[in-house]
Image: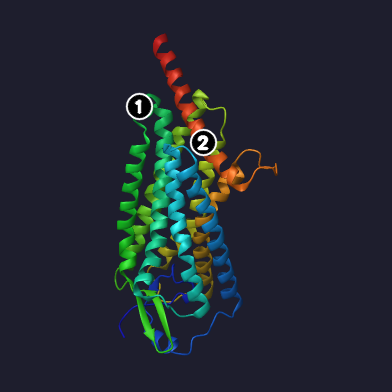
Amino acid sequence: MAEQMATTPDYNYDYGNDSTNKSIHSNQAESPEHCKDAACVITVLFNVILFVLGIFGNGAVIWITGFKMNKSVNTTWYLSLALSDFIFCATLFLTVDYMVKNSWTFGLFMCKFSSFAMTLNMYSSIFILAIISMDRCITVKFPVWAQNQRTVQKAYVVVVLVWIMSSLLSIPPAKFREILDITTRVICYNNYENHQKTIVLLRFTFGFCIPFMTIFTCYSVLISKLRTNQISKSTKPYKIMSILIASFFICWLPYQILSVLELGRSEHSDAFKTAQQVSAALASANSCLNPFLYAFMAKDLKKKCYSFLSKIESAIDEETRTAFRATSITNSVDHRNSTAI
């Protein structure tokens, strides 16, 4: 059959890229082997841990930012991040089931949706991080404008636009997702045909390069301005954002690089396949990291009296208060400078 089939191991189906493999039918038609080897067992356990931690952690952030804290621009950003991560983590049980059974049992729609959820998570997360960086930069660089124009309603509009754009960019990978019934098993795979290069370059450009340049530029301006005016006594909120951004790039950079390197390859060495599996697991891990980064960056980490949820709320609330204080102080400094001329 002339279709292009996935050569990536099935238990990494959410991240596999495709190359021509006409022998897949004969190879895969054998009786499916359940998850017995060490690599598969470790991957299953890792995904189960991510599922539990991701659902609990992101669910906690959604509850805190959506229902417990006062609505603000900052809580809107973090609520969007948590929703994106929560949706992806909720689909991890599909991955676990597929790895254990070595057969896809959820139909074509869920096969496509699993790919859509992963890509949506990637785009929406990096877009929101880029927007947060721009928001910080504008707040510090143009405090008067930010104080008058920076509203929760406008933040909601921006978030909606981000999700619409992320959804549109996530449709092409899902479109090429297919299932194939081979005697004793069903596989869920990517059938990019001749569009793999377009999909990979689109993802690398909009899901990595452009957001990276935006974040780098904003943080360069932000750091320069903060050092000049010394407008913020607490640097913790900026450390939180820096760590969130760093964790995203650390988790996603290997996957993006390997996706580009795979273009044009017809065969994959065992080392390359292992690297793909590790990069896929690392990309998945990013979806459950953020809530714990909030907690560990909050005040009084070493004191046992504070609960996990209190730490998350403290971290987000501190950033909100510091951003407001930075705007007010910068506004005051600019006002004094203008009256002294």
Where is residue 128 drawn, in percent x and y?
41, 46
Identify the disc placed on residue 121: none
Image quadrant in which you'd find residue 170 = bottom left
Q: From what the image shows, is residue 164 above or below residue 102? A: above
Residue that sits furthest to the top in the current view: 340
Q: Is residue 312 left or right of residue 103?
A: right
Q: Amino acid at mark 1?
A: Asn
Image quadrant assignment for residue 263? bottom left
Q: Nearer the viewer, residue 197 or 248?
A: 248
Kindly report the distance in space between the C-alpha atoms of the residues bearing marks 2 and 1.
19 Å
Mark 1 closeness class: few <14, some 14–19, many ≥20 residues within 10 Å: few
Q: Position of residue 236 (x, y in %)?
A: 57, 36
Q: Give the number of the disc on residue 319.
A: 2
In the rendered structure, which amino acid carries the disc numbered 2? Glu
> Percent from the top left, x then y, of residue 284?
50, 61
Asked if marks 2 and 1 touch (Cβ < 8 Å), the reply is no
Taking the spot 57% from the left edge, 27% from the top edge, the residue there is 233
Q: Quadrant of the N terminus?
A: bottom left
Check the image and report above or below for 121 versus 142.
Answer: below
Task: Kindly identify the residue that appears in the image at 60 percent across and 41 percent down.
Answer: 298
Side (left or right) of 57 relative to 191: right
Horizontal side of 140 relative to 100 (left or right) equals left
First reached walking from the N terminus: tag 2 or tag 1: 1
- What residue is rendered at 48% in x and 30% in y? 224
Q: Tell me if residue 241 comes above or below residue 82 in the rendering.
A: above
Query: Crowding at label 2, few (<14), some or many (≥20) Cα neighbours within 10 Å?
Result: many
Q: In this figure, which residue is indicated by the disc labeled 1?
A: 148
Helix, strand or loop status at disc 1: helix
